[in-house]
Image (cartoon, grey):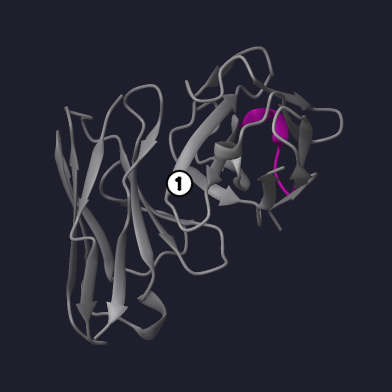
């Protein structure tokens, strides 16, 4: 099973700051990685698919990069609504697996 | 509007059974694989199972293989998850989720239901 390790576990930032979240795979998943945002009590929302493609309706401040084993989700300037938990997910191998999540909290 | 609506969750004893349903609307249901993803209280996301658009192919996580069965009724635009031999560790919110691409295979999940809570406890 592919293990996705997200870092840091918690990121404490202020609105307007840049957020950089990391996801590392235990073996190469090519570019087959997605990112999701989840707020308390809500279902996850797809942000990025295939490493760098923004999903429909996702603001341009969200961007994804990487391939192989190392991936990054960048939020260029944090808005108040961006404070949430973020998960990565790979689709290169069965079973599909998620990272353990990074919480972006208000500093 | 594209929408998924789960139902069927509840409290069940260890060893018991439960069937979850997910009613889909606003898209061509038969064109998309559908998955179940669960989230234990305070924990992360775990993919559980996927079924092809036609319903003839399925895959499962090892943690539920042999106990859970995914199915769909394309005439009713409804996805199901039959859960047997339930364990305490199956306690979670269960989400149904639509694949982002048509004819994909649990690639990425662009539409999620609101979730239904399953509690396994004596």
**Residue B27 in magenta stretch:** yes
From what the image shows, is residue B39 above or below residue A62? above
The residue under the point 23% across, 30% down is A29
Q: Nearer the viewer, residue A3 or B109?
A: A3
Magenta span covers which residues? Answer: B24-32
Quarter of the N terminus of chain B within the rendering: bottom right
Q: Residues within 10 Å of mark 1 (few under 14, many from 20)?
A: many
Image coordinates for residue A3, horizontal then vertical, percent: 26, 34
The residue under the point 31% across, 66% down is A103
Q: Is residue B23 visible?
A: no
Label 1's element? strand
In the picture, measured across the screen, residue A105 lies left or right of residue A58, that is: left
Q: Chain ID for label 1?
A: B
The residue under the point 56% across, 64% down is A42
From what the image shows, is residue A44 above or below residue B28? below
The image quadrant that residue B28 belongs to is: top right
Image coordinates for residue B36, horizontal then vertical, percent: 59, 37
In the picture, measured across the screen, residue B69 lies left or right of residue A20, that is: right
The residue under the point 23% across, 79% down is A77
In the picture, measured across the screen, residue A30 lies left or right of residue B62, that is: left
From what the image shows, is residue A47 above or below residue B119? below
Q: Is residue B48 visible?
A: yes
Q: Which residue is mark 1?
A: B45
Q: Nearer the viewer, residue B29 or B83?
A: B83
Quarter of the C terminus of chain B within the rendering: top right
In the picture, measured across the screen, residue A59 lies left or right of residue A18, that is: right
Image coordinates for residue B17, horizontal then vertical, percent: 77, 29
The image quadrant that residue B96 belongs to is: top right
Image coordinates for residue B65, horizontal then vertical, percent: 56, 18
**Residue B48 in magenta stretch:** no
């Amino acid at each position: 099973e592919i293990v996705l390790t997200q870092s840091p576990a918690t990121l404490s930032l202020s609105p307007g700051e840049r957020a950089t979240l990391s996801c590392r795979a235990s073996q190469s998943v090519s570019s087959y990685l997605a990112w999701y945002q989840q707020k308390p009590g809500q279902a996850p929302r797809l942000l990025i698919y295939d490493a760098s493609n923004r999903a429909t309706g996702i603001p341009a401040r969200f961007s994804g990069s990487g391939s192989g084993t190392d991936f990054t989700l960048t939020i260029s300037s944090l808005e108040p609504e961006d404070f949430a938990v973020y998960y990565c997910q790979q689709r290169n191998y069965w079973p599909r697996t998620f990272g353990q999540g990074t919480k972006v909290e208000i500093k | 509007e594209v929408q998924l609506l789960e139902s069927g969750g509840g409290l069940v004893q260890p060893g018991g059974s439960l069937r979850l349903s997910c009613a889909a609307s606003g898209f061509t249901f038969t064109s998309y694989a559908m998955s179940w993803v669960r989230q234990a209280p305070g924990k992360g996301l775990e993919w559980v199972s996927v079924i092809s658009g036609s319903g003839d192919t399925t895959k499962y996580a090892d943690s539920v293989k042999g106990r859970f069965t995914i199915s769909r009724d394309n005439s009713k635009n409804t996805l199901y998850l039959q859960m047997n031999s339930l364990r305490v560790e199956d306690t979670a919110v269960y989400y149904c989720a639509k694949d982002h691409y048509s004819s994909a295979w649990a690639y990425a999940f662009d539409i999620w239901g609101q979730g239904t809570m399953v509690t396994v406890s004596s």
